[in-house]
Image (cartoon, grey):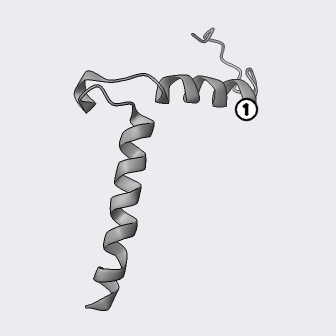
Amino acid sequence: MFVRINTPAVGDRQRLEEVAAELDSRPRKALGWETPAERLAVASRSAVLRRPLEFAL
């Protein structure tokens, strides 16, 4: 995927974002064949729904 070069400036931010998006869109067996992005979205919604209850205590 990446050529190993000792210079950290190689590869631009856009390319890194493309690779991250590609990896986040791949289903994972460990996640029940959901993508990491799908799992994160579910977790984010759950946290938002729980938050008002936590502050009410």
Tell me if 43 is positioned left or right of 2 in this view: left
The residue lying toward the viewer, choosing from 16 and 4, is 16
Q: Residue lying farthest bottom?
A: 57
**For the image shown, how many numbered marks are present on the structure?**
1
**Quadrant occupied by the C terminus:** bottom left
Tell me if 42 is positioned left or right of 16 in this view: left
* Displayed quadrant of residue 54: bottom left
Please give the name of the residue rendered at 73% of the width and 21% of the height, measured from the top-left corner: 11
Task: Residue 38: give x, y in percent of width and height.
Answer: 41, 39
* Displayed quadrant of residue 34: top left
Please give the name of the residue rendered at 73% of the width and 32% of the height, measured from the top-left corner: 13
The residue tagged 1 is: 13
Asked if residue 50 is positioned above or below residue 3 in the image, the reply reads: below
* Displayed quadrant of residue 20: top right
Asked if residue 27 is positioned above or below residue 49 in the image, the reply reads: above
Please give the name of the residue rendered at 66% of the width and 17% of the height, measured from the top-left corner: 6
Task: Residue 53: give x, y in percent of width and height.
Answer: 29, 81
**Quadrant occupied by the N terminus:** top right
The residue lying toward the viewer, choosing from 57 and 9, is 57
Q: Name the element at disc 1.
A: helix
